[in-house]
Image: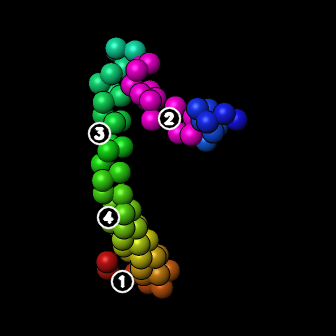
Amino acid sequence: MSSNEESPEAMAEESMQNAGGLGEIVPEPLMPAWRQFERVQSFRERHGETYVTVLEVLTAIALAGGYAWWVYLYLLGGSGAPI
């Protein structure tokens, strides 16, 4: 390699930086949906860790509540006790 040639990795990195993304090829009628998708992606990039943590907590609460309801029905469901 001569001194002015770039390595394949450097060329790939430069190519990725110059790429504009899918926004360049999305047809005009689909642009509103594409913009919404981009907004969601930017939200996830900014608040990713917090977003995932909150979803995990909500999922844990829902699963725990469902399990408690199942135990209640299993233990007292046939006894005729009012809910």
Q: Residue tagged by mark 1?
A: 81
Badge number at residue 50: 4
Please state the horizontal and vertical placement of residue 19, each as a whole percent of the image: 46, 29
**Crowding near the residue tagged with mark 1, few <14, some 14–19, many ≥20 C-alpha atoms within 10 Å:** few
Looking at the image, tell me whether mark 3 or mark 1 is earlier in sequence order: 3
Q: CA distance from mark 1 to mark 2?
A: 70 Å
Helix, strand or loop under label 1:
loop
Magenta stretch encompasses residue 2:
no
Specify the principal SS of the magenta part: helix
Looking at the image, tell me whether mark 1 or mark 2 is earlier in sequence order: 2
Helix, strand or loop under label 3:
helix
Residue positioned most to the right: 1
The answer to whether any part of residue 49 appears in the image is yes
- Residue at horizontal 41%, vertical 72%? 60
From the image, state whether disc 1 or disc 2 is nearer to you: 2
Helix, strand or loop under label 4:
helix
Please state the horizontal and vertical placement of residue 22, each as a whole percent of the image: 44, 27
Colouring rule applied to residues:
rainbow
**Crowding near the residue tagged with mark 3, few <14, some 14–19, many ≥20 C-alpha atoms within 10 Å:** few
Q: Nearer the viewer, residue 49 or 80?
A: 49
Residue positioned most to the front: 3
Q: Which residues are magenta?
A: 10-26
